[in-house]
Amino acid sequence: MNRGFFLLLAFATVMLPAMWVSGKDYSPLKIEGTFDYINDADFKDSAISTQHMNYAQSSAEVTYTQPLCEEFGLLISGGFKSTHIDWAMNPSFKEKDFYYYNVGLGAYTLAVADWTWILKGRVHADVEVAHSDYMLFEGLLWGKHKYYCHCFCDMNLHFGLIGDSGQEKTLILPIIGVDFLATKCLKVGMVFPMDLSISYLFNDCFSVSSAVRFFYRRHRLDNDEPEPRGVIQYRNMGVEAGLTYKHPCGFYANAHAGWTLEGDLKIANKNGHNSSHYKTEGAVYIGGEVAYEF
């Protein structure tokens, strides 16, 4: 799969709107956090096959929804994300932990019947370096159309665009797909690249699911690294099983575990060129998500 194409899949998983606003039924404030950890991924290259890497990524964000009228409103967000790359004999950089904060601004509209449209932008900045070369810019345009179908319940059609730019890379992808209830207990998400999952609903609170998860982070290195101001990126994907709990009060929690496929740690110079790729084998990963809307 094309590398740039793959990384946008992962980027999509962190650009989901805080909520799909529906008339007057919305939550003005949402707090959410995620964490994933990949354990002991062995390198594929025979020269370093006895070495392994641990990887973790986490994020936290607060989003405030401010309606301006019944059909239009604003989305304001702020958050923090961290990445941990632990490779004991890493030849290109010494730093193991990377931290970014972000701010976002967006808008939604319900002006067209059975449609919800969201436009949102977000800027990520390095906690330690206040320079545009270390920033990442994200953008999202996403429309959801409630489609009335005799075959399935609660069907929604999705259309839009998603993209990011910064640290020597720019990419834009379409959003397209559908989600629906195949039966009263079986929910299917086929929204590329935002939601690829199948869930079985035990009741209004508990469900289990099988899903595809994408991992992606990109960072710029410090000046004092062996590759000064170089750009690193990690990408991978996994297949997982998960357990989800949703409470009517607005609380959401998910725990999941799975197996990754072939990972790729890319290290490039400050201009994004002369890159080296370190491939990793599949490995076990675990993670969790929690959110509260009120």
Image (tube, rainbow, N blue to C red):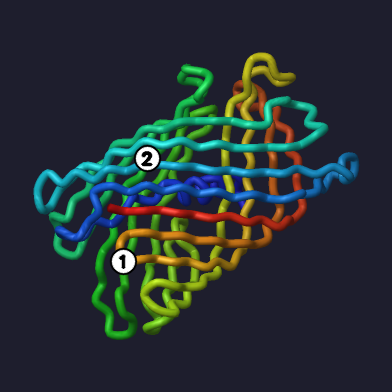
* Picture residue at 71% right of the left edge, 53% below the top: 262
Position of 52 with respect to 225 (left or right) is right
Q: Is residue 89 left or right of residue 146?
A: right
Residue 102 in the image, given as x and y percentages of width and height: 41, 32
Q: Is residue 122 above or below residue 69?
A: above
Quadrant hosting residue 113: bottom left
Q: Nearer the viewer, mark 1 or mark 2?
A: 1
Q: Nearer the viewer, residue 127 or 217?
A: 127
Q: Residue 248: give its label.
A: 1
The secondary element bearing badge 2 is classed as strand
Looking at the picture, which amino acid does disc 1 mark?
Pro
Residue drawn at point x = 28 percent, y = 57 percent? 20
Q: Between marks 1 and 2, how big is the CA–CA gap?
A: 31 Å
Image coordinates for residue 288, horizontal then vertical, percent: 54, 55
Neighbor class of circle 1 (other Cα within 10 Å; few <14, some 14-19, many 20+) is: few
Outermost residue toward the top?
224
